[in-house]
Amino acid sequence: MAAVAFHKKDSTPAPSATPMVTLEGVNKWYGQFHVLRDVNLTVKRGERFVICGPSGSGKSTMIRCINRLEEHQKGRITVDGTPLTEDVRNIEAVRREVGMVFQQFNLFPHLTVLQNCTLAPIWVRKMPKKEAEEMAMTYLKRVRIPEQANKFPGQLSGGQQQRVAIARALCMRPKVMLFDEPTSALDPEMVKEVLDVMVELAREGMTMMCVTHEMGFARQVADSVIFMDRGEIVEQAPPAEFFKNPKSERTRAFLGQVLAH
Amino acid sequence: MQQVDHLTTTPEAPPRGSSGAFVWVRKNLFGSIFSSILTLVICGLIIWFVPSLVEWALIKAVWPGAGADACRAASGEGACWAVIGDKWRLIIFGRYPFDEHWRPTLAMLVLMGTVLVSCDRRFWSARLIVVWILGMLVFLWLMGGGFGLTSVPTGLWGGLPLTMMLAFFGMVVAFPLAILLALGRRSSLPLIKVVSVVYIELIRGVPLISLLFMGSFLLPLFMPAGTTIDAVLRAQIAIILFQAAYLAETIRGGLQALPKGQSEAADALALGYWKTQLLIVLPQALKISIPPIVGSLISLFKDTSLVAIVSLSDLLLSMRQAMGDPVWRPFFVEAFLFIMLIYWAFCFSMSKYSQYLERTLETGHRRR
């Protein structure tokens, strides 16, 4: 859909060897429904993963498990060495290091753009207000909306709101960024402005996991593309291989549908 | 400055006969046969009722300053406002020592000032809590004495100051309690949830009057012998407990109106439960529930008259006690009208304020 300009991938920094996120035999059920089946995944520092698949395939559930917005019932999830357990301290430690961008933006409507960005640094990181505001402004500049700092989210367009949401997550200086269909709720003409920001972020070496159907984005920045169906990882491969030679029949069928238009 | 006009037609004035007083009357009062009949009937009632009311309340009325004899002479024809002139201090202040009436007056002004400050959205911050604590302490000091003022036991408190105290203190103290109950009812911790649900449903299931009764007659039976709780305090506690249960449900309505994404976003930022509630959830939820909150304050203000059951002289009872005077007893209707006017003035202002808030917050909340 959105035509993102293609760049050579060689210019991006090489991923280092330490794992940032590992999922080992992760299972989850909603009642009787088995949403995640034995998911195994390792994301190294600086790696960029794109996760795709039909709706209901468990891709959002999987990345929501990584910051414990959803609870997995079996298996192990480790983020930067911290295992996700019942322990609230572990959960909060993980959440401090994991930024998340939602499909519906989820900005706080009663706070200005700047307050949205400084809230967590001030209350969680205990950063002085002035310092937090300066940092927020640098991130708002990077997502190209510093002039909107004192507006309320409701006064911005969808694309601008999503860029604020990215800036808000970045203000916690996360080690990993999770994107849960960040462009699905946007009008077509606003998709590009958000993808551009994400591409830039990927180039700077941020570890990223993106659930998205933007295959152009996957080709351009992903180190690895994951196809999920019915709660399991069906295929995982670098984009060139993933798009050229999908091994599984299910992947081929899915790509046929997504890339048809 | 000339503008390029892209319209192909020029704007026209609306056709004649689509506005104006005559058109309004025809459209709204005589729109159909039924509407015409209703209009005529109501006009008839007004013509029949209003002149005699004006005659009774104004033209043939006996004004303050005249004696009870003048009232008795005009009995049945004109209102006896003289009774208000003679008894108003007794009605408003109850049995509070006559020479100290300046104290409840000042106390009421302090309380009203605190309420008015709370009405202004610019003052909506944590500092308001301090203002209220100070306001309530000053009120209690002026009413009860001590620190240089002669002591007045609560048994002598009465009238409007007591009514105001029971209503506003009840509301303000119940408020934080209600927030905790509302959060508790939505808590994922089973024990806290059960306690909140049981409390809310138990209290909401019984009339306020029975709580007041229990507080006054049953509670002392369970207390260790010799300990007594002040009657006013007991009534105040019963009102707080009652109001907290109702408010909790109102606030829960606001909490449920919030999209789940708000608390998820806060969770993802590692804000933790209490910061999420205080910084994200409650500011938005309370904004939504302000109109019903003011609505329940209006109910509470009138419900305070139930404390008469435990012999507290609120405005209503102090009026009836004032009318115990055999000289003025026949003119209780006028005294009733007088306190009705006071209740109405309070409740109508609150209602107007609620409408104002609804208007201003509506736009505030649509910004998303």
Image (cartoon, grey):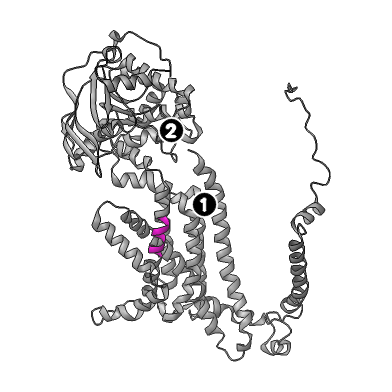
B167 lies above or below B227: above
Which residues are the magenta region? B243-251
Residue drawn at 57 percent across, 89 percent down:
B325
Residue sitting at the far right:
B16
Nearer the observer: mark 1 or 2; the answer is 2
Residue drawn at 29 percent across, 80 percent down:
B220
Residue drawn at 31 percent across, 55 percent down:
B184
Mark 2 burial class by Cα count in 10 Å: few <14, some 14-19, many 20+: many
Question: Which residue carries the number 2 mark?
Answer: A113
Rendered image: mark on residue B120: 1
A78 lies above or below B137: above
Give the chain letter at badge 2.
A
Seen from the viewer's position, the closer of residues B84 and B145 is B84
Kind of element beneath mark 1: loop
Is A230 situated left or right of B51 in this image? left
Spatial distance from mark 1 to mark 2, Cα to Cα? 25 Å
Residue B126 seen in the current view: no
Seen from the viewer's position, the closer of residues A251 and B32 is A251
